[in-house]
Each structure stands twice: as C-alpha cells, then as structure tokens.
Amino acid sequence: MMNKNNYENKSYDGSFSKKIKNSIVVKLMVTIIIIFIGMMTLSNFMINICVNNYFQEFDVEIENIFQTANHDDLYLLINEAQVKSTLEFRLYIILIMLFTVLIGCFFLYFIISHMMKPLKSLAEQVSEIDIHNIEDLNREIVAIKGGYEIEDLAHTFNVTLKKLYLDYESQKKFSSNVAHELRTPLAVLYSKIDVFGKKSERNIEEYEELITSLKFNIERLADLVSKILLLTKKSNNIKLRNVYLKDIVEEIVFDLEGTAGEKSVTVTITGDNISMCTDDGLIQRVLFNLIENAIKYNVNNGKVNINLSKNDTDTIIEISDTGIGITDEHKEKVFDIFYRVEQSRNRALGGYGIGLALVESIVKVLGGKIFIRDNKPQGTIFVLSFQNIDSKMYSGSLN
C-alpha cells in the first residue's frame, strides 16, 4: 500500500519558468492583450478611413459653398455642413467601437472556451466518482494538458482521494484486527467454560483453574478495550502541568521490578530530574509502555537505561535496551496498529501490537516525536523528543 505522506510529497512543483509558461492566467492575459491590440488596430484603421472620407466630403461641401453662396451667409452654411458631418462622424465612430468590441468578445469567448476544456474534463471525472465505492477512491484523475493550475487541481483531487482510500483501508484493517483480537480471548473463555460444563465431576482445583483462566482473559479484554479507547482520546482532553520526569521514571521502574527480576534485567536511570510541561498521565503511559517493552523483549541478564536530557529547545528521553533489536524493515512498521515483529513472541508475552501504536499516538498528541535507533553493539534505542513549552502559555489544555 502506498504511504500517504510519500504520495502527498510527490515532486510536482516544477520550475517557475515552466509554471509561468503553462499558466492559464498568463495565457489569458496574453490573449486579452493581443485581442485588445487587435481591436485598437482595427478601430484605428476604420476610423482613419472614416476621417479620410469625412475630409473629402467636407472639402467638396466647402467648394460648393464658395461657388453658390454670397459672403453674408457663408459662415452659416459652413457651420451647418460642419455640424452635419460631425454628427455622422461620431455615429460612425460609435458603430466602429461596437463592432470591434463584438469581434473581440467573440474571439475571447472562443479562446476561453478552448482553455476551459481541461477543467470541464476534470469536472466530469470528479462527478463520476462514487465516494461510497472504495474502488473509485483508488482511481486517479487524469488532467488534460491545458495549464499547470488544472494539473495542480487534479493532483490535489488525487491526493485527497488517496487519503480517503488509505483512511478507509486503515479503518477496515483496524476493525478486522479488533474483531480478531476480541474473538481470541472470547474463544478461549468459551472453550474453557464448555469443557468445564461437560465434566460430570468437578473439584476445587478445577474451579480455581477456571476462575484464574476467566480472570486472565477478561483482564486481557479489558486491557485491549482500554488501549483502543485511549487511542481515540482527543487532544482537547489533555491537561498540562509541570512534572518531573525522573520521579515518574523511578515510579515506573519500581512498579516493573518484578518483571525485570524474572529476566534478571538491570534498569538504570541517567540524567537530571528535569521538568517538563505535559500531561502527566499520558507521559506516564508512554514511558511505562516503552520501559516495559525494553524489559520484556530483552535478553536474560540484559540492561535497560533511561536517559533524560534537556536543551534550549527540546526535552529528550532515550530508552535503550540490549535486546535482539529491530531491523530497518520493521522500524517503519512497528508503530502501525496491531503490527507485531514476531507473532509468536508477542502472543507468548501477551502483546496485541497496540502498545507502540498507542505510544506514537500519545506522543503526537503531546506535540512530540518518536523514532528508533540501533543500540550498538546490540539492542534498540527509542528516542522521544518534546519541544519545550511554558505551562503559563496554556490554559490547562493542549489544543
């Protein structure tokens, strides 16, 4: 499946000169200028013809006046001829202007209609898309060459459709995985109860075994539902306050002493007890998940180190272990919901593949970043980076 960000970040800009050359706006401006120049040229040509005819007729009129009129009424006769010719000249000029405007509008309409054909084609393709049909969301709109604006618009439509398609596929996969994860413990519960019910005689040990199994699987279901609900937690529910990270980490390490002791894993904390403006409940959940994973997926007699540091711009938390590590191929996928590096190992340890997806979701909500590095010579380092913020700048919540 194509990655959404890769699709969106596709190189599409092109050079500035190429954009100018293929711009509909530029083409339209050039067209209007050419039509305007043509209209002015045509109108001037026709006006010149009119002016020449005007002076020729006026000369003839003057000549006739001198031949037929006496000196007393000469001025009046010339004035009447001039007024008559001037009115005809003005009327002719108006007709010329109307004629040239009509011709200009005709050519402009023709050219604009031709330029808009790609847009019409794009509109037809978009109108044919059925948003209720998942296959339509995966189709690609092809823009007819006619301007980079049309191509940009088509590209934007394609990016939007791809986002909808990927989101739909993600939701579909999420629903399928949730159903599968819920069905597994329910099937175990049903099987245990069914086998227990078919027994004719039952002793106290069997009752205790059944209750233990029921309790374990119910706790797994409750944990799964809790994590799914936390994944959907909105950022406007976050309460910010200054917390001291070392205190939180020490409390987590204390809670996980039993888990670490089972594999003889040594957990150390380095760095100062730095403060951070965040939601203490959510950051505690993130750190607990990562530290617990570092212990559970470590080797016997392994080591886990939590390093806390802070600079002028960021607060950085590094959780390193000496486990088997994560390959580059899996590093890109471990934050996907329900993804497991090793199916059998996660099953044996009670994992659903939700933990790291939940961690990444919370980190993003808190405005931070998370990435993975190799821990030389063996193991993995999870790096959390949060931009330093002042709690006084926020009214108790992060939007």
Image (cartoon, helix red, strand yellow):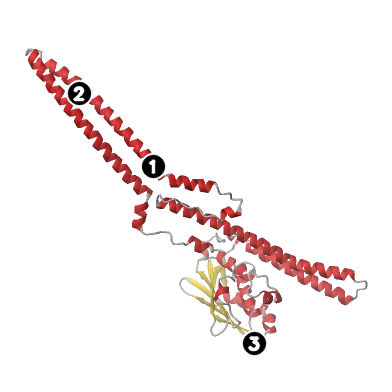
In this orientation, which residue lies closer to the viewer: 60 or 335?
Answer: 60
Q: Amino acid at mark 2?
A: Thr
Query: Which residue reaches farthest right?
Result: 200
Look at discs 1 and 3 and give the one toward the viewer: 1
Q: CA distance from mark 2 to mark 3?
A: 111 Å
Quarter of the figure with the C terminus: bottom right
Up/down of 223 relative to 294, above or below: above
Q: Mark 2 Cα within 10 Å, few/some/many (few <14, many 20+)?
A: few
Of pointers 1 and 2, the one earlier in the residue sequence: 2
Q: CA distance from mark 1 to mark 3?
A: 76 Å
Quarter of the figure with the N terminus: bottom right
* Relative to 291, 11 lies left or right: left
Q: Which mark is residue 301?
A: 3
Say which element carries label 3: loop
* Relative to 380, 19 lies left or right: left
The residue where tag 1 is placed is: 112
Tell me whether the residue at label 1 lies in contact with that at label 3, contact meaning CB atoms closer than 8 angstroms.
no
In the image, residue 12 lies at what x, y percent?
43, 59
Say which element carries label 1: helix
In this orientation, which residue lies closer to the viewer: 234 or 69?
Answer: 69
In this orientation, which residue lies closer to the viewer: 394 or 263?
Answer: 263
Q: Which mark is residue 86?
A: 2
Q: Amino acid at mark 1?
A: Ile
Tell me whether the residue at label 2 lies in contact with that at label 3, contact meaning CB atoms closer than 8 angstroms.
no
